[in-house]
Image (tube, rainbow, N blue to C red):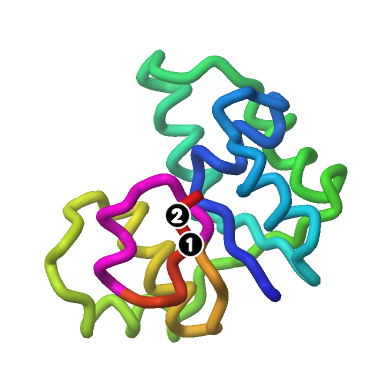
């Protein structure tokens, strides 16, 4: 299974946070490929700038490869997938992540149950 991590899932993985459920850990560990979107890094860096997240941006980037994950750029095809999305979620970062999951396709791992309204590709754990 190929998995795309939602931003908070990636951050919790890096921190080895107890907020990351055992089910989510198992999915990540058993996935054939785990992707982290450029959108997640963009979101995290914005939150760092706003004082809502304490992290070193360079560590967030390095953590992708160090974790054995693959970076996922945002492509024109991903942005086209946004045009067909229902308006279930207003967060632009979550919307591009779901568009990426649909366009690739990938399973999107999140704790945001609202995202599951988009597709069976969304895994809430």
Mark 2 neighbour class, 10 Å CA radius: few under 14, some 14 to 19, many 20 or more: some
**Quadrant of the image occupied by residue 38:** bottom right
Report x, y in % for residue 125: 50, 49
Nearest the camera: 61 or 123?
A: 123
**Quadrant of the image occupied by residue 58:** top right
Helix, strand or loop at label 2? It is strand
Q: Is residue 114 left or right of residue 99?
A: left
Task: Please check the rendered image and state whether residue 88 is part of the magenta-colored stretch, yes or no.
Answer: no
- Residue that sits furthest to the left in the current view: 87
User: What residue do we see at 43% from left, 41% from top?
Assistant: 43
Numbered range of the magenta stretch: 109-118
User: What residue do we see at 80% from left, 71% from top?
Assistant: 32
Task: Please check the rendered image and state whether residue 112 is part of the magenta-colored stretch, yes or no.
Answer: yes
Report x, y in % for residue 30: 79, 61
Which quadrant is home to the N terminus?
bottom right
Q: Which mark is residue 123?
A: 1
Report x, y in % for residue 93: 36, 52
The Cα atoms of the two marked residues, 2 and 1, are separated by 4 Å
Nearest the camera: 68 or 30?
A: 30
Report x, y in % for residue 94: 35, 55
- The vertical placement of 79 against 113, above or below, is below
Helix, strand or loop at label 1? It is strand
- Residue that sits furthest to the front in the current view: 23
Q: Are marks 2 and 1 in contact (CB under 8 Å)?
A: yes
Mark 1 neighbour class, 10 Å CA radius: few under 14, some 14 to 19, many 20 or more: many
User: What residue do we see at 44% from left, 85% from top?
Assistant: 77
- The vertical placement of 80 against 2, above or below, is below
Q: Which mark is residue 124?
A: 2
Q: Is residue 118 left or right of residue 37?
A: left
User: What residue do we see at 49% from left, 35% from top?
Assistant: 44
């Amino acid at each position: 299974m190929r998995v795309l991590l939602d931003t908070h899932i990636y951050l919790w993985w890096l921190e080895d946070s107890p907020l990351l459920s055992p089910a989510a850990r198992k999915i990540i560990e058993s996935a054939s490929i785990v992707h982290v979107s450029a959108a997640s890094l963009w979101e995290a860096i914005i939150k760092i700038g706003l004082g809502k997240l304490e992290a070193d941006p360079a560590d967030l980037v390095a953590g992708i490869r160090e974790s054995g994950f693959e970076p996922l750029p945002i492509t024109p095809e991903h942005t086209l997938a946004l045009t067909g999305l229902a308006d279930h979620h207003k967060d632009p970062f979550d919307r591009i992540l779901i568009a990426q999951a649909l366009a690739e396709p990938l399973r999107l791992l999140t704790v945001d149950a609202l995202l599951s309204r988009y597709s069976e590709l969304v895994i809430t754990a």
